[in-house]
Image: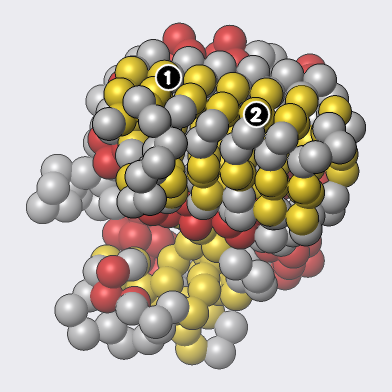
Amino acid sequence: MKGLILCAGKGTRMRPITYAVPKMLIPVANKPVIHYAIEAMKESGIKEIGFVVSENRAELEPALGNGKKWGMKFEYVMQEKPRGIAHAVLCAEDYVGKEDFVLYLGDNLLERGIKELVDDFRRAKPNSAISLIPVKEPRHFGVAVVKGDSIISLEEKPKKPKSNLAIVGVYIFDSNVFKAAKRIKPSGRGELEITDTISELVRMGLNVKPHLVQGWWRDTGQKSDMIEANQAVLDSIAADIKGKVDEVSLIEGRVVIDKGAEVTGSRIRGPVVIGSKAKIINSFIGPYTSIGDDVTVENSSIENSIVMSGTRISDVSRRIESSLIGNKAVIEGADITASASISVTIGDLCRIEVD
């Protein structure tokens, strides 16, 4: 079985940060989102992964390499234009060949990975397995109707859902999926939809099996989703302090401080992750904040945020919260007396001055 991770999206809902960083490389708890997908594949026993990419290949391939780091083999498949998930699958037909494969949307996070899904598929040997999860507002998702141990119909964002089972962005297919994808027509938005493809598999009389996801699921397509994913992952960390913390600093709860980081005259309230060579000086960090490598925070307060590598935040009088801050950004303030808070999304190398 091979893995196929879709990475060709432009991340328009995450701009301006995705002008410089592909959304799959944005870190959650100081680890790029796509690393969670790769690790889930490896844990399930998959040894070969194809990444469907676009012009972002120039950033993704150097960042991920050939798979040797993970003891796996990576290849890259081009999707020249964004024509839908099913189109991306067709782009990878030559790569996949006749093998079964896991299709994983690269901006998804699953608490318990995909091992249960893969094990169930290998045991039952259906033509397809679709990950589903109960949700409160199914009209915002693709929705599956299940009868017994089979999926009998699917709808994309229905006004009146027939079930509460949302389609998660992780699937397993055998080679019949290529035949089904070639039979469907573009949707109203001009794309070949994966829901239409799965519906075609059902019409073909093939066995499409539901798999109920255990634990949480996050789609990190927007800033708020990314912040929520960061919270979810940080909730599972264990305290691990390898950096330097001076005698007057206060560390509360589950806090990870990487080797080479320094905390001086500050209060850190977990769950928090602080990367290598970061410097936290006379500041408050946390909870639910991840601070990247080589970040400096001085005379400032941050919580429920993601701060990427090389950024400098100093003398900001207002508390920074629910923010996504890119690499090597600069946020500076004039004093530390005001009490209001701010929330920002800024990309790489941006600069903000706060009065």
Q: Earlier in the sequence, mark 2 or mark 1?
A: 2
Disc 2: CA contacts within 10 A as few (<14), some (14-19) or many (>=20):
some
Query: Which quadrant, please, contains the N terminus?
Result: top right
Q: Which residue is mark 1?
A: 329
Toward the viewer: 27 or 34? 27
Give the percent coordinates (x, y) of residue 316: 42, 33
Report the residue that reaches farthest toward the left: 188
Q: Which residue is mark 2?
A: 281
Residue at (57, 28) in percent of width and height: 297
Q: Quadrant of residue 214?
A: bottom right
Give the percent coordinates (x, y) of residue 206: 49, 67
| Helix, strand or loop at mark 2 | strand
Label 2 amino acid? Ile
- Give above or below for 32 relative to 75: below
Residue at (67, 24) in percent of width and height: 279
Does residue 44 appear left or right of residue 169 in this picture? right
- Give above or below for 185 relative to 125: above
Q: Mark 2 or mark 1: which is in front?
A: 2
Give the percent coordinates (x, y) of residue 43: 80, 46
Report the residue that reaches farthest toward the front: 337
Toward the viewer: 48 or 11? 11
- Give above or below for 179 relative to 71: below
Residue 208 is labelled as none
